[in-house]
């Protein structure tokens, strides 16, 4: 149980275009999802907290107009990288927390999306 | 502020030998500590957690971790390493009381040599 599906697993796009990444909790409801960015040989950088039915909470330094997050249902959050540039190339990972989870519940991660902007 | 440190970028161990991946933490209040593993081009998988109780926590794939309050450490251990254990390991701590956010360490790459 607790499967999180992230799609696509990899994407190549041209500079200036937008890319949408989906994160779905397949067998549980997730009121809260998190979006991370991981640079090569570095740790996870939390970008934003996605809350179902409300606006996402962005971490300091993350441009909310560039990284659009929508959490329209209890099983789906999307991250759209708008007007992508080569510096946006990275590995993006989502994670989900069960709606009935507590503060000591583990996170369930998707398999990540490798974005390459040419 | 909560923080977690993984002092080793990489740990090499021979197959069959015991392994230890180190983690130290700094929290205000009771620590909620986690270990996750990441295989190449994949997301993170939960291994184990410490919330309260027994200082020795057992988790998935034969891993265990020892919580040491006096040394503020939460080292990951396994009695006998497998080549398939080679991966990137992250220690994490809950960011603050009353939040679901977690702070991750910088990760330790474990390489098990055949």
Image (tube, rainbow, N blue to C red):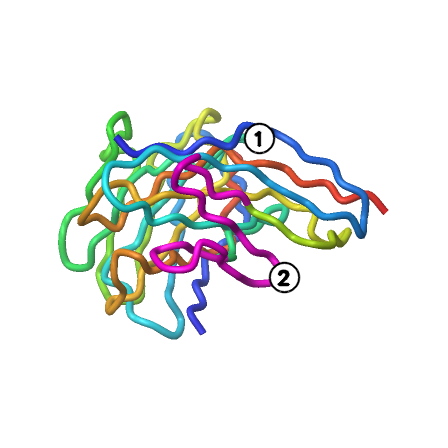
Which image quadrant is residue A4 in?
A: bottom left
Q: Is residue A106 above or below residue A39?
A: below
Locate residue B107, reporting x and y percent.
53, 36
Q: Which residue is under mark 2?
A: B62
Q: Which residue is mark 1?
A: A41
Q: Quadrant of the N terminus of chain A?
A: bottom left
Q: Which residues are magenta?
A: B48-75
Assign a secondary structure to mark 2. helix
Of residues A50 and A102, the one nearer the viewer is A102
Q: Nearer the viewer, mark 1 or mark 2?
A: 2
Instruction: Tell me, yes or no, whether the highlighted magenta stretch contains residue B59.
Output: yes
> How far across and how far down the image is residue A12, in percent?
54, 40
Q: Which residue is depicted at the point 34% across and 72% down? A: A28
Is residue A26 shown above or below B96? below
Q: Determine whether the residue tagged by mark 1 lies in a helix, strand or loop.
A: loop
Was residue B14 drawn as part of the magenta stretch in this picture? no
Instruction: Find residue B81 and name its label.
Output: none
Viewer-nearest residue: B36 or A48: B36
Chain for numbered disc 2: B
């Amino acid at each position: 149980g607790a499967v999180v599906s992230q799609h696509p697993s990899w994407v190549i796009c041209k500079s200036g275009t937008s890319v949408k990444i989906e994160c779905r909790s397949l067998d549980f409801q997730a009121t809260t999802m998190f979006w991370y960015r991981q640079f090569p040989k570095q740790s996870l950088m939390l970008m934003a907290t996605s809350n179902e039915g409300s606006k996402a909470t962005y971490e300091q330094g993350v441009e909310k107009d560039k990284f659009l997050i929508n959490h329209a249902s209890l099983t789906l959050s999307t991250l759209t990288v708008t007007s992508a540039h080569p510096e946006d190339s990275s590995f993006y990972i989502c994670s989900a927390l069960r709606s009935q989870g507590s503060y000591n519940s583990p996170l369930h991660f998707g398999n990540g999306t490798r974005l390459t902007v040419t | 502020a909560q923080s977690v440190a993984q002092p080793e970028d990489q740990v090499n161990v021979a197959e069959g030998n015991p392994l230890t991946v180190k983690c130290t933490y700094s929290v205000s209040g009771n620590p909620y500590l986690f270990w996750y593993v990441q295989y190449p081009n994949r997301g993170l998988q939960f291994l184990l957690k410490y919330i309260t109780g027994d200082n020795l926590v057992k988790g998935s794939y034969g891993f265990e971790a020892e919580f040491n309050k006096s040394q503020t450490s939460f080292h990951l251990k396994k009695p006998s390493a497998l080549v398939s254990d080679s991966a990137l390991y992250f220690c994490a701590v809950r960011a603050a009381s009353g939040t679901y956010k977690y702070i991750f360490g910088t990760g330790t790459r474990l390489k098990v040599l055949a």
